[in-house]
Image (cartoon, grey):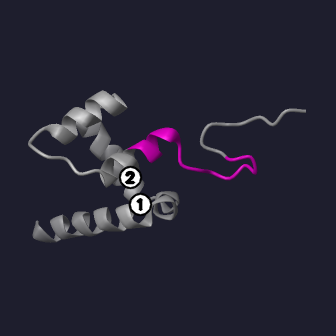
Amino acid sequence: MAAVTVPGMDQEGERRLGRRERDILALERRGFGGPGAKERAIREELGLAPVRYFQLLNALLDDELALAHDPVTVNRLRRVRDARREER
């Protein structure tokens, strides 16, 4: 009998990051030169409005699976987010 795969779950039934979440983290690892380059990449590569992208990214930063998948990027972005909150 063939294994059935459910989006967001691995073969053992554990939750895993979906393709979109992994793509968001990959985009955050990249550097962008010039104004608007990141927003353009968000629209063209992910098909998301920048506002929605940043909502998803913010939620992803609180996800332990994202931390396990890419600890360097997630911790860097958490530090940036925390610094901005302290400025307010």
Asked if residue 3 lies in the magenta stretch, the reply is: no
Location of the N terminus (image quadrant): top right
Mark 1 highlights which residue? 62
Residue at 52% across / 58% down in the picture? 65
Name the image quarter holding residue 34.
top left
- Residue 62 percent coordinates (x, y): 41, 60
Q: Are marks 2 and 1 in contact (CB under 8 Å)?
A: yes
Amino acid at the residue labelled 1: Asp
- Residue 27, x across and y down, in percent: 33, 46
Judged left or right of residue 52, residue 21 is right
Residue corresponding to mark 2: 59
> Which of these two is toward me, 62 or 17?
17
Secondary structure under badge 1?
loop
Residue 70 image position (x, y, % from top left): 45, 60
Name the residue at 43% across, 66% down: 71
Magenta residues, start to end: 10-23
SS under mark 2 = helix
Q: Is residue 14 above or below residue 85?
A: above
Looking at the rendered image, the quarter that the C terminus falls into is bottom left
The magenta stretch spans residue 13: yes
